[in-house]
Image (cartoon, coloured by chain):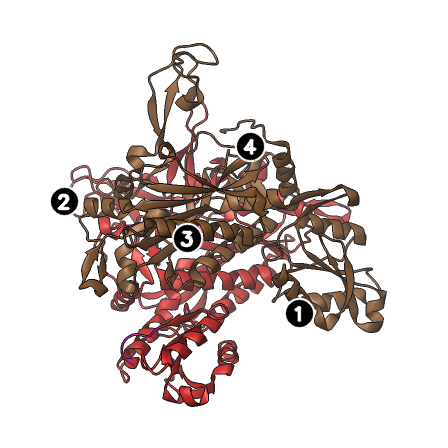
Chain colours: A red, B brown
C-alpha cells in the first residue's frame, strides 16, 4: 500500500541498509509489503532514540528551573485546530487528472499546467488537501465527533497554559516542554526518516514579556544550535537559516531553521520561531477563557505573554546522528558508526578472547558488575576481529577483551573504536576509566 | 463533546482534585469543554510517569541479556489486525433505540430486553461496534487506504520477529519489549485514568519452546507481581487472578491478571498471558512469510515459538501509585502522597528557612550542586510549614532546610516525609545520605 519506489541518495541507501542489518530501523509492516513513510525502531535504534530524548529532557527540563515538563495527549478537541489555524491553513493544494485519476501537488507541477504530466488528461481545479489525519471519537450517535491526530505537540502546551501556571509558581520568562508523537499525512515523503507520516517531536514554548522577543529568539537559536554540537554533530555541517518574510508560517513573526548538511543537502532539523502572542490569543478568543499571566510585580497586571518556540524532530535528529556518524574506514576495511559515547546505544562490549581457560568466566563477571551502571554488551562468539567489526557497526565506543594476561595480572585491554588504540587497564579500574572517557569525549 | 457526568468513587474524586491542583493530571482540552477519557500529564505527572517507564525498562530490558527493546509505530498495515483477530473479534455488540436514537452496549442491558430503558422505544438488532479508531493514510486516490490506530503494541513486536532475530543473535527463550501509546474507542470509560481512550502500554513478548508454556507463565506472573511491589505498592493490595476458560481472550490459552485493590475494588493492572503460537502462526498464514526460529542446536530445525506475554498499562500503574500513596494524615493535618523515593517526581526539596542572613545563598548552592544528580526542587517562598505541606502533597520524600545553625557549622536539617523525623547532617554529606535513604527504602 502507498508503496513508491523512492530513489534515495546513495549514502542514505547505505545507512538504510546498515540500519536494517543491525536493528536500528525497519520500515513499518514489512511482512505485509510495508507502509510508506512509517518506521519502527529496532533494539539498537530504540536505545539511540532514548538517549537523544533523555539528553534533550535533561538539557531543557531538568537543568532549567524555569522550564516545566508535561505530556499531553495525541487526541484533542477539534476546536484546538480551529484556533491554531491548522484546519484553515495546514493543507496543500492538489489537482486530480480527470482521465487517469492521479493526484498531484500543485507546487510540483509546472506553472499554468492544465493537463496531466502523465496521460495528458485534463486537470481539475485545485482542491485543498488537509495534512491532518482524521478519526472519529465516541460510539453513540449523539456524542461521536470527528477529531484529528495532532500534527504538532505545541498546541497541547498552549491549551494547558492555565493548568500549568495555576499548579506551579512561575514567573516570566518560563517555558513548558514536552516530547511526543505527531502525525502528518504527507504527500511528499522520502529520504528515509527525514519526512515521515508518524514522527516524534521535542517542543518547548518559552513564555516571555512582549517586546523581549528578539532577545530570547537570539538566545534560543544559539542554545539549540549548541545542543546539536553537544550530541557530537560536526559543527561545520550545522548552520542557521533565517526565514525570509515569504517563508514564515502563518503563526510566525520571525524564525530560524537549524539546518544540517545531509548527504542530500542542507535541510531543516529544528525551527526556532517567534510565535508572538498568536496561539494564546487565538485560544482566548475561541474558548472565551482567560489565558493570562498575572504580573504580581506590576500590581496584578494581566499579560498575554509572547512565545519563542523551539521545535525539534527526534527522527530527524536520529537521521542526523546516523548520517554524521557513518564512516567507511577503508584503510582498516570496516564500517564505523562514530556515535558520541554519550548517546551510543552500547557504551562498552566485553569479550573473552577465547571461550576457554576461564576467560569467559572473568568476562562475564566484568559484564555483570558493569551492566547496571553503563550500557554494556557481552559477546563470546566468533573471531575477535569479527566481534570488533560488529561493535564498530553498532557504534560501540569501547571494547574490553579478557585475554591470557588477564588470568595472571587481572588486567584487560580496552580498545577505542575510532583510533583503534588499545591499552591495558586493571579490571578494578574499568568503570572509572570508561566514565572518564565518556565525559571527556 | 462526549461529555458524561461520571460519578467516581469519593477517594478517586479526591485524587483527581489533588492531581489537578498539583499538576499531576488534567483532562484533555479542558478549555474547550474536555474530551472524555483522554488525559494530559502535568509537570509532576510527567516525571512520575517517566520514572515508572524507566523503572520498567531497566527491569525488563537493561537488566536482562535475553530481552531486546524496540519501538514500533502506531500506524501499521491493516492486514496486521486481520491476522491478529482484532478486525473480527475486537468489538462490542450494541443496540440502537429506534425512537430516541440512543445507543447501548448489549451487556449493559437486562437479558432479553427488547425496549429502550430510557424511552421504552423499540431496540434494533445488535450491531458490532469495533473499538479500533480508523483513519485514512495517503493522499492520492490510487494509494489511500483505511488504517487503524493500534489497540495494543504487541502486534508491532510479532510482525518484526524476523527483523529482530536476523539483526541480533538470540537463543530461545528470549523476549522483545516495547513501550508505546495505544488507542481504544471505549464505550464504557471512567474511574479517572483507569480506562482511557488513549493510553500507554509496556508490553513484552517472551518467545519459548512450545511445551515450556506453563513453566514460563509461572515465572513471569511472579516476576511481574514482584515488580509492582518494587514500586512500593502495598503487597496486600495486589493479587493474582487466574482466568477461567470463559474469561480468556481469543488468542489466549491461559492468563493471569495482576489486580490491585483500587478504592473502587480489585481491578486488572496487567495481564500475563500464554498466547501459544497464535500470533506468529496467524502472521505466517496471512503474510506467507517464514516467521520461524532456526534451532542451531537441533540441526537447524524450524520452530514457531510459543509466547508468554506480559502486558502492563502505564496509566493504570500511575493510578495504582496515586491511589496507594494517597494519605490523609489527620493527626498532622496534611495530605501526603507517599511515593516510594525511587519513583517520586521530586526526591528532595531545598529551603532557606528565611530569605535573609545568607540562607538563600547557601540553599541555592546546595540546589545547584545537587540538581543534576538527584531530582531536586528549590523553594524560597512562604512559611516553612506551608513549604513542607506543599512537598508532602507532591510526594517529595526529603526536605533540606538551611537555618541559623547552617551559617555556623555547615549543617542542615533533613526531614523525612512520612515519619516527620528531622536530623542534622553536614552539607557535604547530603548527596550520600539521600542516595542511601533512596536505596534502603
Q: Which residue is mark 4?
A: B33
Q: Nearer the viewer, mark 4 or mark 3?
A: 3
* Upstream in sequence: badge 4 or badge 3: 4
Badge nearest the viewer, 1 or 3: 3
Mark 1 neighbour class, 10 Å CA radius: few under 14, some 14 to 19, many 20 or more? few
- Locate residue A124, reporting x and y percent: 24, 37
- Tell me the element at label 3: helix
Residue that badge 2 annotates:
A119
For marks 2 and 4, give the CA distance.
Answer: 50 Å
Q: CA distance from mark 3 to mark 2?
A: 63 Å
Which numbered tag is attached to residue B219? 3
Label 3 lies in what chain? Answer: B
Same chain, labels 1 and 3: yes
For marks 2 and 1, give the one nearer the viewer. 1
Which tag is nearer the camera, tag 4 or tag 1? 1
Q: Percent x, y for residue B388?
A: 75, 52
Q: CA distance from mark 2 to mark 1?
A: 75 Å
Q: Whole-Å distance between the Cαs marked 1 and 3?
A: 36 Å
Q: Residues within 10 Å of mark 3 (few under 14, many from 20)?
A: few
The residue that mark 1 highlights is B432
In the image, farthest residue toward the left: A119
Membership of A381 in magenta stretch: yes
What is the C-alpha distance between the residues marked 4 and 1?
48 Å
Q: Is residue A317 visible?
A: no
Amino acid at each position: 500500500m502507498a508503496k513508491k519506489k523512492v530513489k534515495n541518495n546513495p549514502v542514505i541507501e547505505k545507512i538504510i541498509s546498515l540500519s536494517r542489518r543491525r536493528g536500528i530501523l525497519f520500515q513499518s509492516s514489512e511482512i505485509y509489503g510495508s507502509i510508506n513513510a512509517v518506521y519502527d525502531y529496532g533494539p539498537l535504534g530504540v536505545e539511540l532514540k532514548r538517549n537523544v530524548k533523555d539528553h534533550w529532557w535533561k538539557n531543557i527540563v531538568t537543568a532549567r528551573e524555569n522550564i516545566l515538563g508535561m505530556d499531553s495527549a495525541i487526541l484533542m478537541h477539534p476546536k484546538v485546530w480551529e484556533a491554531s489555524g491548522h484546519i484553515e491553513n495546514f493543507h496543500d493544494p492538489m489537482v486530480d487528472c480527470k482521465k487517469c485519476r492521479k493526484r498531484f501537488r500543485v507546487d510540483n507541477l509546472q506553472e499554468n499546467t492544465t493537463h496531466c504530466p502523465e496521460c495528458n488528461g485534463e486537470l481539475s481545479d485545485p482542491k485543498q488537501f488537509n495534512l491532518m489525519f482524521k478519526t472519529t471519537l465516541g460510539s453513540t450517535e449523539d456524542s461521536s465527533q470527528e477529531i484529528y491526530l495532532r500534527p504538532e505537540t505545541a498546541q497541547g502546551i498552549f491549551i494547558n497554559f492555565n493548568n500549568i501556571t495555576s499548579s506551579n509558581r512561575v514567573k516570566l520568562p518560563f517555558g513548558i516542554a514536552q516530547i511526543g508523537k505527531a502525525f502528518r499525512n504527507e504527500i511528499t515523503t522520502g529520504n528515509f526518516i527525514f519526512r515521515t507520516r508518524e514522527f516524534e517531536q521535542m517542543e518547548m514554548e518559552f513564555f516571555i514579556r512582549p517586546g523581549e522577543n528578539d532577545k530570547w529568539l537570539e538566545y534560543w537559536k544559539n542554545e539549540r544550535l549548541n545542543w546539536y554540537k553537544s550530541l557530537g554533530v560536526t559543527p561545520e555541517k550545522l548552520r542557521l537559516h533565517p526565514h525570509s518574510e515569504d517563508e514564515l508560517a502563518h503563526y510566525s513573526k520571525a524564525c530560524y531553521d537549524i539546518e544540517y548538511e545531509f548527504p542530500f543537502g542542507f535541510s531543516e532539523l529544528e525551527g526556532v520561531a517567534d510565535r508572538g502572542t498568536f496561539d494564546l490569543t487565538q485560544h482566548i478568543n475561541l474558548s472565551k477563557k482567560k489565558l493570562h499571566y498575572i504580573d504580581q510585580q506590576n500590581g496584578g497586571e494581566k499579560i498575554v505573554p509572547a512565545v519563542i518556540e523551539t521545535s525539534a524532530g527526534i527522527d530527524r535528529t536520529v537521521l542526523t546522528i546516523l548520517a554524521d556518524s557513518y564512516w567507511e574506514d577503508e584503510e582498516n576495511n570496516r564500517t564505523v558508526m562514530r556515535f558520541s559515547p554519550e548517546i551510543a546505544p552500547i557504551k562498552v562490549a566485553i569479550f573473552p578472547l577465547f571461550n576457554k581457560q576461564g576467560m569467559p568466566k572473568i568476562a562475564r563477571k566484568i559484564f555483570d558488575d558493569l551492566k547496571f551502571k553503563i550500557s554494556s554488551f557481552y559477546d563470546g562468539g566468533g573471531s575477535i576481529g569479527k566481534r570488533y567489526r560488529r561493535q564498530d557497526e553498532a557504534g560501540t565506543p569501547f571494547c574490553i577483551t579478557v585475554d591470557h594476561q588477564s588470568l595472571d595480572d587481572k588486567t584487560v585491554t580496552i580498545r577505542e573504536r575510532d583510533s583503534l588504540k588499545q591499552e591495558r587497564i586493571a579490571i578494578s579500574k574499568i568503570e572509572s576509566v570508561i566514565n572518564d572517557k565518556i565525559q571527556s569525549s
